[in-house]
Image: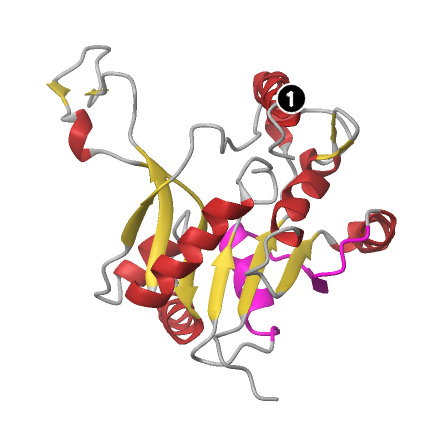
Amino acid sequence: MPRTRPKVFVIVPAAGSGTRLGGSVKKQFLLLKDKPILVHTLQRFEHCPDVDEIALAVPEQSIAEIETVLSHYHLHKVSKVTVGGEKRQDSVYNVLKKIPAKLSDIVLVHDGVRPFVEPKRISHLIKVCKEYSAAVLAVQPKDTIRRSTGGGFFDQTLDRNALWLVQTPQAFRAELLLKAYEKAKKEKFYSTDEAALVERMGVKVKIVEGSYDNIKITTQEDIELGKLILDRWRNNGIL
């Protein structure tokens, strides 16, 4: 029977070195309580009914390790493991070229070290993307934000209501995302996220309200905060 809806792929770049956390273990493989951070992240998508396939970009030397991890934790939606590139953008592009996505399908990109995105929020993001072709999770800052152009003094207070802290996953029509990546590669343009690449195509990206729990684990302090979030989620029956 032919598919009646776009297929949903998730690309998870997990090829970073995690130098800010220190140590010899790459941060995506560090334990958060009882499981590697990456496993917590992948399980959010494994348990989302609207996600069909997951594809990973990992360091070449970690491929055997990740395949063992996938088998141990029964992460059946992970259908492809690819060697990452020099930068995050290169890693995502490596995977994007290899997944069997049709132009009308949906592709999500999510940081491997963001383990606290709820499956219901993923589903909502996918729904919005189907309508607008490009959508990202984001939250507004809680603190006052001021700008400094140097010299150790502030020179402007920014309007907090007009600012957003952008998160992942970010969702796009496959055709749009592929064109955005091809344009960026041709022009040797690098950005820290996919939304910026798509905006260079003249496409507006729809904001979808995220969660303050959806942290990116970068420092040791983030690990400690992640443990607290994990305990709260388990106590509240989210997991």
Kindly identify which residue carries mark 1: 235
Question: Is residue 172 part of the magenta span, yes or no?
Answer: no
Instruction: Tell me if residue 175 can be seen.
Output: yes
Label 1, secondary structure: give it. helix
| Residue 139 pos. (x, y %) | 34, 34
Left or right side of 103 for 47: right
Magenta region: which residues? Answer: 74-99
Residue placed at 62% from the left, 43% from the top?
Answer: 16
Q: Quadrant of residue 225?
A: top right
| Residue 91 pos. (x, y %) | 58, 58
How many discs mark residues in the rendered view? 1
For the residue pair 228 and 177, the one nearer the viewer reads as 228
Question: Is residue 90 part of the magenta span, yes or no?
Answer: yes
| Residue 219 pos. (x, y %) | 58, 23
Q: Residue furthest top?
A: 153
Mark 1 residue type: Asn
Quarter of the image that includes the C terminus: top right
Left or right side of 217 for 67: right
Residue placed at 64% from the left, 21% from the top?
Answer: 235
Q: Residue furthest bottom?
A: 1
